[in-house]
Amino acid sequence: MTKEEILKGLEYVVEPDLKKNIVEAGLVSNIKIDGNKVSFNLAVSNPAMHNRKRITDACDHYLQMHVNKDIETDISVSALSSDPNEREDAQRKYLSEVKHVIAVASGKGGVGKSTVTANLAASLAKQGYKVGLIDADIYGPSMPMMFDTVHEKPGVKDFGDKRMITPVESPWGVKIISIGYFADPEQAVVWRGPMATKALQQMFRDVYWGELDFMLIDLPPGTGDVHLTLVKEAPLTGAIVVSTPQDVALADAKKGVAMFQLKEINVPVLGIVENMSYFMPEDMPDKKYYIFGKDGAKNLAEDLKVTLLGQIPLVQSVREAGDAGRPAVLQADTPQAKSFEGFSKKVIDEVTRIKQPEMNLN
C-alpha cells in the first residue's frame, strides 16, 4: 500500500458539513503505513460522537473496498476551527469559492458608504475580476437602485440535494444579493436584531455565488448585531472604513476601525477612504472647495497607522450616476472615475500585501 492509494480511497469519503471529499478539503494528514495497518489524522467540521463514528466508518469502508479488504485503520479525529478566518479556503463551509471577502463599513450614516462600495465593485469588475456584492445594509438597501436592477429578482437552482438562491447579475458583471430584491420598495424594513442577523446568514449560506475574486459586503452604519454576525460567518480578508473629512464623521470612523481591531474580532483594516473630500464644480475641475474640512480622514489614517485608500471628490454626477444605476467609475476619463479607479487599485495593493507571499493579484 502507498500513501497515494490511501488518498485515492479516501476521496470517496464526503465531509457532511462541507459537502466535499476529505482529500479535496485537505482534512487528511500525517498518513503512516505499517503492513496492513494505516494511521492518519482527520479534521472534521462537527466532532460530535455520532458524526465522528459515521465518517470514520466511511473511511474504513472505502479503504477496504478500494485499497485492501484486510486493512486496519487508526484514525485520530480532531475539530476544525469554528473561526472561518482560521480555515483554509477549501475547508470553509460558506463562500469557499471566494478568494477575498471585504467588508465596507462606516461609523455613521450619510458618508456615502454604499456609493463607495458600488463604485469599488464596478471598478474591480471593469478590471476583469469576478465580483460579488452582498447588500447587508438590511434597513436601507440601495444596491438594486445603484446597479439599475430594482425590478430584477434572484433565481432558484438545485445544486445536488440543496436548493440555492442565485444572485442578480448587473449589466457590468457584478453579482448582487440584497434584501431590496425581496421587499416592496415602498415598504419600510422593520426588523429586530435577530431577524436581521438571520437574513444576513441566509445571504452567505443559501446563495450560490460560484467562483469569485472579490466579495464586497456593504454593512449598515455603526456597530451592532449584523457586524458581529459577519465576523462570525464570513472569512474576511479585511475591512474598509468610509468617512468624510469633518470631525463628527471622523470620531465615528475611529470607532469603526477600533471595532475591527478588537482582539475577539481581529480583522485586518485595509484602510480608510475619504469620501466627499472636496467639492469640485464640473465646469471648473481645477477648483477644489473643502466644504467638510481638509484631509480629516488622511490625518486620521496617519494617527491610526492605517492606509489612506483614496480621497473621492464631491461631484454632482456621482450622485446622478448612482440614481441612474450606472456607477460613476464607469464614466470615461473623468476626475471622479479616476479617483475611484485609484481607490480600487489601492485596495488591491493592500489585499496583496496582506496575502503575500501566497498570492499576487497584479
Image (spheres, grey):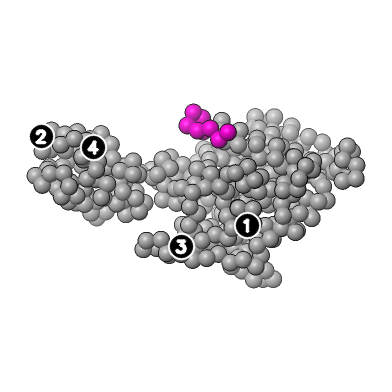
Amino acid type shown at disc 2: Gly
Q: Are marks 1 and 2 in contact (CB under 8 Å)?
A: no
Specify whether residue 358 is painted magenta. yes
Q: Please give the label number shown on residue 170.
A: 1
Residue that numbered label 4 is attached to:
4
Q: CA distance from mark 3 to mark 4?
A: 35 Å
The circle on residue 164 is 3
Distance (Cα) linking label 1 and label 3: 19 Å
Mark 1, Cα crowd under 10 Å, few <14 / some 14-19 / many 20+, is: some
Q: Main secondary structure of the magenta part?
A: loop
Ranked by sequence position, the earlier of labels 3 and 2 is 2
- What element does badge 2 sit on? loop
Specify whether residue 326 is in view: yes
**Mark positioned earlier in the residue sequence (1 or 2):** 2
Q: Is residue 21 left or right of residue 118?
A: left
Instruction: Name the image quarter holding the N terminus.
Output: top left
Cα–Cα span, label 3 and label 2: 46 Å
Question: Looking at the image, is mark 1 or mark 3 earlier in the sequence?
Answer: 3
In percent of the image, x 58 and y 44: which residue is there?
129
Q: Nearer the viewer, mark 4 or mark 2?
A: 4
- Residues in magenta? 355-362
In reply to whether residue 240 is colored magenta, the answer given is no
Identify the residue under disc 2. Answer: 35
Position of the C terminus by quadrant:
top right
**Judging from the image, what secondary structure is the residue with disc 4 in?**
helix
